[in-house]
Image (cartoon, grey):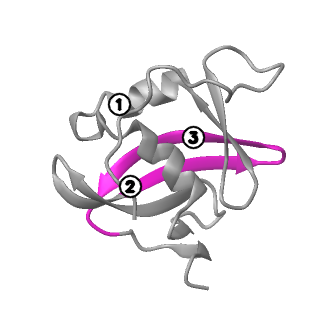
């Protein structure tokens, strides 16, 4: 379960050498490096219910309760973790990640009442 956090003003020590400015690399629960660009983060935080939940994106990738895919090709995957105290009540954060050979990046993130139906790719309860 995640707490309610505000995104830090400056993300120090997260940029790898050779990456463009405005890209954070988050190592997910399985050791996969996932890119989160400033543009994608701004898109996520444009939604009023997500304004104070920027850190929840990173925390969800690092410690999800469930990873599933709604697509037959298993791409993109949705990483889920529960969160309490959002502006719209207790919810799940879904972070949508597209991963392909050697590259993974965040497409979007949103709040949902419950995980959607799909193929479970990973579960914390396994």
Percent position of residue 92, x then y = 34, 61
Q: Residues within 10 Å of mark 1 (few under 14, many from 20)?
A: some
Measured Cα–Cα span from mark 2 to mark 3: 13 Å
Circle 3 — which element? Answer: strand
Instruction: Measure the C-alpha gap from mark 3 to mark 1.
Output: 13 Å
Q: Say if 2 sits above or below 26 in the image.
A: below
Residue at x-position 42% and y-position 24%: 42
Q: Which marked residue is nearer to the observer: mark 2 or mark 3?
A: 2
Q: Which comes sooner in the sequence, label 2 or label 1? A: 1
Q: Which label is found at residue 106?
A: 3
Q: List the residue tagged with mark 1.
A: 45
Instruction: Compare residues 98 and 52 and report the one nearer the observer.
Output: 52
Residue 87 location, x and y as percent? 17, 46
Q: Which circle marks residue 93 in the picture?
A: 2
* Secondary structure that dominates the magenta span: strand
Give the Cα separation between the discs numbered 2 and 1.
13 Å
Magenta-drawn segment: 93-114
Report which quarter residue 1 is drawn in.
bottom left
Task: Indicate yes or no whether the magenta region holds residue 106.
Answer: yes
Residue drawn at x 76%, y 48% as measured from the top left = 100
> Looking at this rendering, what residue extends furthest in the left direction?
88
Tag 1's secondary structure? helix
| Residue 75 percent coordinates (x, y) | 63, 56
> Which of the 4 quarters of the picture holds residue 120?
bottom right
Q: Position of residue 63 (x, y in %)?
A: 56, 61
Tell me the tag on residue 55. none
């Amino acid at each position: 379960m995640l707490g309610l956090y505000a995104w830090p003003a400056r993300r120090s020590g997260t940029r790898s050498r050779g990456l463009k400015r405005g890209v954070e690399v988050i190592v997910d629960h399985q050791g996969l490096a996932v890119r989160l660009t400033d543009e994608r983060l701004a898109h996520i935080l444009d939604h009023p219910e997500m304004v104070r939940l920027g850190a929840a994106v990173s925390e969800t990738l690092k410690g999800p309760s469930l990873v599933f895919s709604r697509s037959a090709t298993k791409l993109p995957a949705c990483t889920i973790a529960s969160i309490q105290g959002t502006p719209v009540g207790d919810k799940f954060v879904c972070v949508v990640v597209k991963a392909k050979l050697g590259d993974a990046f965040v497409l979007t993130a949103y709040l949902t009442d419950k995980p959607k139906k799909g193929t479970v790719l990973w579960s914390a309860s396994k």
